[in-house]
């Protein structure tokens, strides 16, 4: 597995970026998506679920069904990032429900025992791979970008999408690029910003921060921007999630090429 730069990644465009829920595209790859678009690469985001098992902040009054809220938030976030191509996994044929999660450590999630059998993390993986392959082929993508095996913080849907994306890449014979999972948990909103290290080449994407802030703002029912953060030459944004957890969104993209 080799580190890869954003410039090298554009050589595989068009690019398919596979995520689990609405908001993951911004939280995990917002800076990358905006930078790729600004470099002229055609990008499609593919979202596995509708985020049905998410939460709404207590101070938000929105009577719409959660799937409608998340659909509109996702559309607004993609506009902010400059991404014009989007699809849900399965299209109009299949709907993969959100699996939900539970915290097993302060910064690590695990499966929710109440998740239905048909949810994304428990459905037939061969069908999920076929659905992703169909979307990737129709878009003409030359590479697939998704999570690594840790899935950012262990969410079962993230981990499943990592396996689906890798299976799809093998099925189609296209490269798979992993976003490296780095520690994201912050103990308090005023704690010092510490940039995790990664044994590879960072892509400093600070120019994307205005677009990333706007995309994060689109998810106002579930998170809020707390402050800007900085460490050495890197910049980012700290957010607080509906459950009270703080997360640092750094404007960089530690990636590695898994298959080619």
Image: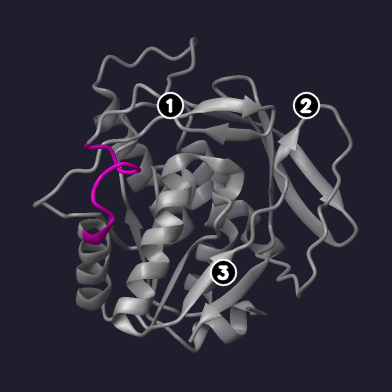
> How far across and down, in percent of the image, does residue 175 sit?
45, 81
Q: Residue furthest left?
A: 93
The reply to whether the C-beta atoms of the residues labelled 2 and 3 are less than 8 Å apart is: no
158 in relation to 186, above or below: below
Residue assigned mark 3: 35
The reply, left or right, for residue 168 in relation to residue 208 is left
Q: Tell me the tag on residue 192.
A: none
> How far across and down, in percent of the image, does residue 130 sit?
21, 66
Label 3 Cα crowd, 10 Å radius (few <14 / some 14-19 / many 20+): many
The residue sitting at 36% across, 69% down in the picture is 167
Residue assigned mark 2: 189
**Element class at badge 2:** loop
Q: Residue 121 colored magenta?
A: yes
Task: Calculate the distance from the C-alpha at mark 1 to the C-alpha at mark 2.
Answer: 27 Å
* N-term-proximal mark, 1 vs 2: 1
Residue assigned mark 1: 112
| Prevalent SS, magenta region | loop
The reply to whether the C-beta atoms of the residues labelled 3 and 1 are less than 8 Å apart is: no
* N-term-proximal mark, 3 vs 1: 3
The reply, left or right, for residue 35 in relation to residue 246 is left
202 in relation to 89, above or below: below
> How far across and down, in percent of the image, does residue 64 sit?
25, 20
Task: Kindly report which numbered mark, 2 or 3, lies closer to the viewer in this rendering.
Answer: 2
The residue sitting at 33% across, 16% down in the picture is 62
Which range is magenta? 118-126
């Amino acid at each position: 597995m080799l580190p890869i730069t954003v410039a090298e990644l554009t050589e595989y465009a068009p690019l398919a970026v596979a995520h689990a829920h609405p908001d993951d595209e911004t939280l995990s790859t917002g800076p990358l998506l905006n930078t790729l678009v600004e470099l002229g690469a055609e990008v499609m985001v593919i979202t596995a679920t509708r985020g049905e098992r998410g939460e709404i902040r207590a101070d938000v009054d929105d009577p719409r069904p959660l799937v409608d809220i998340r659909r509109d938030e996702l559309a607004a976030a993609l506009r902010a990032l400059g991404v014009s191509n989007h699809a849900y996994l399965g299209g109009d044929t299949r709907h993969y429900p959100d699996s939900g999660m539970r915290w097993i450590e302060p910064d690590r999630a695990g499966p929710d025992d109440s998740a239905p059998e048909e949810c994304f993390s428990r459905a037939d993986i061969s069908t999920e791979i076929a659905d992703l392959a169909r979307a990737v082929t129709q878009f003409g993508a030359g590479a697939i970008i998704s999570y690594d095996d840790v899935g950012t913080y262990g969410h079962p849907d993230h981990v499943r999408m990592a396996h689906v994306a890798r299976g799809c890449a093998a099925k189609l014979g296209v490269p798979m690029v992993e976003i490296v999972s780095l520690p994201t948990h912050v103990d308090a909103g005023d704690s010092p910003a510490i940039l995790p290290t990664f044994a590879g080449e960072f892509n400093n994407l600070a120019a994307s921060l205005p677009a990333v802030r706007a995309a994060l703002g689109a998810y106002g029912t579930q998170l809020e921007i707390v402050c800007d953060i900085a460490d050495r030459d890197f910049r980012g944004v700290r957010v607080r999630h509906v459950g009270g957890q703080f997360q640092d969104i750094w404007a960089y993209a530690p990636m590695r090429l898994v298959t080619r």
